[in-house]
């Protein structure tokens, strides 16, 4: 089995806060690199907010040079306007790494929770606790960053399963 180091960027898209998390993966070993949240100003226009998310993700990708990216899928909200805005932020989160030639995977919230916690309907606090257990050196500053690290961990687990299946 090839245990070359791979860097994965996990993204938890949101218009107000877009979480990001970076891990290195060597075989089954997960290594925390960094995490954070891209915040936008609700007082500015939608276009300005989306552009800010794009600029920040692009700068992060150029600085940290991940090999692959993974983005959480949007769940449909009761408020159609909120769902639409979240979908636009998610579009930016998908496009930014793709424009820099990264492979971009997508995972549902339930699959992420099931992969990280073992239960598809786990609470955010349970996800954050398991992320801290899997990445003991991590410094999580926000729920969005914890969720983004969970997205990266999910991609690490599922890409390994795909590699085993292809072998």
Image: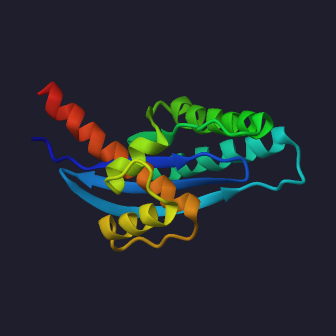
Q: Is residue 21 visible in this depiction of the protein?
A: no
Position in image of residue 1 (x %, y %): 9, 41
Residue at 20 percent across and 33 percent down: it is: 163
Residue at 66 percent across and 56 percent down: it is: 38
Is the residue 112 above or below the residue 100 in the image? below
Tell whether 10 sits left or right of 42: left
Position in image of residue 102 (x %, y %): 45, 34
Q: Quadrant of the C terminus?
A: top left
Q: Which color scheme does this rendered protein use?
A: rainbow
Is the residue 70 above or below the residue 56 in the image? above
Position in image of residue 44 (x %, y %): 88, 49
Residue at 34 percent across and 66 percent down: it is: 135
Q: Is residue 58 visible in this depiction of the protein?
A: yes
Front residue of this view, candidates 55 and 25: 25
Front residue of this view, candidates 164 and 48: 164
Residue at 52 percent across and 47 percent down: it is: 11
Tell whether 70 sits left or right of 92: left
Tell whether 129 sits left or right of 161: right
């Amino acid at each position: 089995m090839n245990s070359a180091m791979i860097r994965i960027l996990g993204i938890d898209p949101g218009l107000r806060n877009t979480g990001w998390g970076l891990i290195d993966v060597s075989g089954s070993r997960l290594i925390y690199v960094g995490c954070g949240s891209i915040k936008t100003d609700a007082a500015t226009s939608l276009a300005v907010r989306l552009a800010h998310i794009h600029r920040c993700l692009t700068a992060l990708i150029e600085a940290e040079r991940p090999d692959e990216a993974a983005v959480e899928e949007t769940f449909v909200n009761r408020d159609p306007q909120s769902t639409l805005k979240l979908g636009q932020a998610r579009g930016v989160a998908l496009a930014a790494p793709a424009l820099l030639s990264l492979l971009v995977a997508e995972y549902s919230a339930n699959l992420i929770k099931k992969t990280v916690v073992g239960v598809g309907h786990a609470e955010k606090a349970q996800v954050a606790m398991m992320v801290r257990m899997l990445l003991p050196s991590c410094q999580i500053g926000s729920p969005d960053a914890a969720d983004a690290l969970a997205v990266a961990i999910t991609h690490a687990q599922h890409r390994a399963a795909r590699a085993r299946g292809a072998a």
